[in-house]
Image (tube, coloured by chain):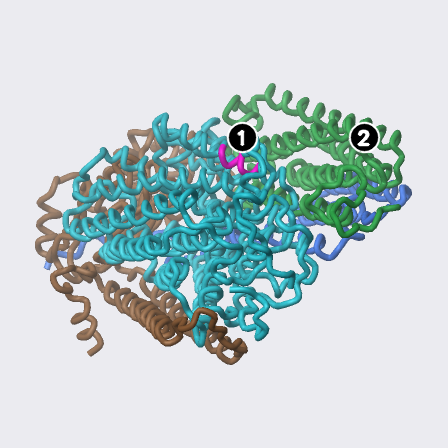
Chain colours: A green, B cyan, C brown, D blue
Amino acid sequence: MAELSASSTHAAVHPPGFRHQFEDMEQQHEAGNLGMWVFLVTEILFFGGLFASYAIYRSLYLPGFEAGSRLLDVKLGATNTAVLIGSSLTMALAVHAAQTGKRKALIFFLLLTMVLGAVFLGIKFDEYATKWHHGLVPGLKWAPDEEMHNNAPLGSVELFFCFYFFMTALHATHMIIGFGIMTVMTVKSWRGEFSPEYYAPIEVSGLYWHFVDIVWIFLFPLLYLIGGRY
Amino acid sequence: MSTAVMETPAASRVHYLNANYGIKSWLFTTDHKRIALLYLGSITFMFFIGGSAATLIRLHLIEPTGALVQPATYNKLFTIHGVVMVFFFLIPSIPAVLGNFLVPLMVGARDLAFPKINLLSWYLYIIGALFTLYAILSGGVDTGWTFYTPYSSTFAHSQVIATALGVFIVGFSSILTGLNFIVTIHKMRAPGLTWFRLPLFIWAIYATSIIQILGTPVLAITIFLLALERLLHVGIFDPAIGGDPILFQHLFWFYSHPAVYIMILPGMGVISELIACFSRKRVFGYAMVAYSSMAIAVLSFLVWGHHMFVTGQSVYAGLIFSVLSFMVAIPSAIKVFNWTATLYKGSISYEAPMLYALGFIGLFTMGGLTGLFLASLAVDVHLTGTYFIVAHFHYIMVGGAVMAYLGGIHFWWPKITGRLYPDGWARFAALIIFVGFNLTFFPQFVLGYLGMPRRYAVYPAEFQVLNVMSSAGASILGIGYLIPLIYLIWSIRYGPVAGPNPWGAKGLEWETPSPPPTENFEEIPVVTEEAYAYAEPEDGSHG
Amino acid sequence: MFNFIFAAIADPWFGFPIKPEDASTTASSVDHLYYFLTALTLFFTFAIFTTIFYFMVKYRRRMPDERPKAIETSTALEVTWTVIPAMLCAFAFIWASSLYFRNSRPPNASMEVFVVGKQWMWHLQHPEGAREINELHVPVGVPVKLTMTSEDVIHDFSIPVFRIKHDVIPGRYSSIWFQATKTGTYHFFCAQYCGAEHSGMIGWVYVMSPTDYANWLSGGSKGESMAQAGERLFTQLGCVTCHVADGTGRGPVLQGLYGHPVKLRSGETRVVDEAYIRQAIVNPNSMPLPNYPPIMPTFQGQVNEEQVLQLIAYVKSLGTVEKGTAK
Amino acid sequence: MSGHVVSVRLYVTIFLLLLVLTGLTTGVAFIDLGDYNTVVALAIAVVKMLLVVLFFMHVRYSSGLTKIVVLAGFFWLAIMLTFTMSDYFTRGWTPTPSGWGPSISAPPNP
């Protein structure tokens, strides 16, 4: 990987995409990585506030939360998890393609990631539609039918669905933002801006996408599987 | 040590101010120095909005039945004073203005790691400020800057959602600034500049950025949930369906106590610089002061429960938070002792920045020690919710953070503008502010112990004497703050031209001409000596 | 001796009151800790100020290009001014926490008063039936336990002269206690911001001699006691149709229930205390019973907090009656 | 360049492992283990998270600084959780009797 050693003056030849405030590509790459990881830590704490409150209320109102969880469709949840893990794989393969300079594979995997992301969002909004139909949307349309009423306190079931919608909607918003990032990356890859020397943007958006996948990895068991489905 | 920079007159030399002109060159700049000035302007504007709310409050409290406004308007006044001062002045002031300007210079880099994100931070600040100004103009918000539920989510009839959105957005400006600093300090230090050769200002900014990164997102999610709850009339803090308002307080204070360390830590960094420069000595116990900054950053996340001793938080959790709140006071004490020890056998001069620094040490000691009253369970039961709390945090924030901010502005003003300000006026203003401050807030300690609650528009007559004293002090303090505004602006055009190092200070930022060129350094300097190496025998270094 | 010094210092200082009266048994103990911490603060502030002034004068810059010698940082000094503040903090912590635990335990034979905070006034009820707004009459020398809740937002019942205060949270009971030592009229405040008239929620505590208190109590409105008011509500709201004394009703028998453990459907056993009764009234199906269908409607919104307190007082009065004997 | 190139085969094996774990956690949810259901579900989720973080996000091959940053994120989340939980779980243990003490009516007339 030929890179002219930085001559004394600053006019050294650097690969495309080099930012002037850095000394060399190595420093820029590491800075980009560290920057994204620090951002992901803020996301961990951003979701963390919700997870902490969910954990506390779940321990305080276990029967209501289990009743609410039983109303969620585990099959859809499981397929969604598989879809998202698949998109994580395609994202990792995209980063691999960028590292090895295979432009066509990079574009293919980026598009595949976006397709899987779209499938995930499709399933998600279908779930929201069924919840709306059953009147399980706290605040907007809360009219749970009879069979659920008598065996669990209504207030805590409503609390459960508050958490269900807050957490999954926040996650879906992050998916949509990820979708936007992927489109930009696909366009840039299409224009051939990336090379084995300069593929940091792909790697950084990959980190973001994997993070969103990890959030769902925790959301799925905490929301869908605690219903005591036996 | 790179050779001394020749003293070409600033006017003929191209530097970051005259590199290019026009509104677009400012609104779309990615130069950290210009962004620092953009912040300086917007922060000073917000400071005077919060300050005018404070003056109206003090005028209103002259009479027990309220001299100026209706109680409902008074509630809006103290809320706006709180929100604007905390989120739009104290948190961004030193990191965004001095930090943005100085971190690349002190670290020996050409710019921050992510210049475009730095500009985005400023725009987020402006959008957040616009939301809050809209909230003020369209009726104001009357929930207090703490937004406690269920009042703020179900019972308040004011612009809570607009203010919540403003605070939500300005939070991300703080996060991105912190992110920028962490990556720059880690990855872009000049060759030879090891961690323990960094100026203590950089250590303080680094510790502050860690708090900004780890704390602000929790405030963002809490305020977001509050806004949702207010819109949907249902949510996780709503007692009607089993939600717990105390959970809101837990999540809010998880950020808001570390936030008070976001406000004071950069101030401590500035004071380390000022004390070292004006006593021409390396800061005593450099490593201890650096470690205490990091210790404060970590411990500040473990103490938030002392805000909730009487809110029905369990007694045993209160016990844990009380012992940790006592522990967090120790690093601050270490810093004060180290600053005082730095003066020993130094050669002290009393320019205006040094007066601000010495004032800071005195007032911060008072502020810090009164914190011990609030960490001890038995006394806090009597003092919480009273004016003792108001006095305590104003001693730290106004006596500490604002004095350090003014000291820092005065110290680096020659480097920022290339001009010197009239030192006589500056010293006079520093004394006025010190006197006015003490007159305003010391009576409030006594008011607090007498039991006068916070946020009262009308109060029993026996508290009037102390309130009038406090209002009198506030008028002096108000004037004290106006004086620097005048002579600093005056100095931009008429002030004597400043050389690259008017104070004879040590540090990479003083190696550049003032004002520095856009790319900061022709070629990145190599650092060979320790920080604050004033006692070097060879007097190669100038001034 | 100790009290003498403190009294001398803390008396109105040149005409300025610098501390509220200590009118309760625990007030002076809090004051002593406050004085210790004030002394600590003044000592350290004074020490720092004088050291700085001394250094500023002694080491002022005499020649413009003076270069002071570098000073080696001494770890011994660093250790001393870390350990000494740590020990002082530990001492203050231990004193404060033990004092807090001692002050927070009300004597068993305390007199009860129920406080309900609502947006911008305080309702106070004595079990004997006396009801007051923004006023509290108590006998001197008798420990009084305040049990408090809120109708709407978070308030905070604060009596400075007794050095006590506690937030009043909707949906929960919180309690504080005091034993007045001086008769007189003192302020109580709302110390947690609660809206427009937050500063209007000021009231008076009248500490009276036992005889005056007894006259006031009997002389006052000959209202029914809380238990009687609760019984009236019990029938008025139709509770009596299900909760029948001889067990023939659809709901559980309430006679002799108070204070005894009850097994819930989820297997958890809970003691029937005030919080349990309140939850049963306000949110009945959040605690289904094993052999009763959860058909009890919620009374949230139909009864305000004072009526809930009266119903609780009534159910407690049933608790003392032996099971099965109709009242 | 600095990034470590991971073989495609390893990616696919990690992917399959994640799918197996998803199936496992869904399956286990249908068996009544009482309280342990939550523990098992969380343990599997943590394992899946570690797989994604270490291999897909290359933390296993990256600098110590990145590892510290990741650990700090989870450590601070743990701080928030444990301290808030410490409040909720010890609320019942008040030193004074939780309900009202046995109340007496006003003192008898002297």
| Label 1: chain letter | B
Task: Give me the residue at 13% from left, 52% from top.
Answer: C185
Relative vertical location of residue A101 with respect to residue B423 in this rendering, above or below:
above
Q: Is residue B504 visible?
A: yes
Which region is colored magenta?
A: B120-126
Q: Which amino acid type is shown beneath numbered disc 2?
A: Ser
In the rendered structure, find residue C171 and report the number of the disc placed on it. Answer: none
Q: Given this view, does label 2 or label 1 mark the residue nearer the observer?
A: 1
Magenta span has B534? Answer: no
B121 within the magenta span: yes
Disc 2, SS: helix
Residue B153 position, x and y percent, is 42, 33
Q: Chain of mark 2?
A: A
- Contact (CB < 8 A) between labels 2 and 1? no
* Res C181 quadrant in image: bottom left
As measured in the structure, the alpha-carbon distance from the residue carrying label 2 to the one carrying label 1 is 36 Å
Look at mark 1 in the image and give the residue it sits on.
B22
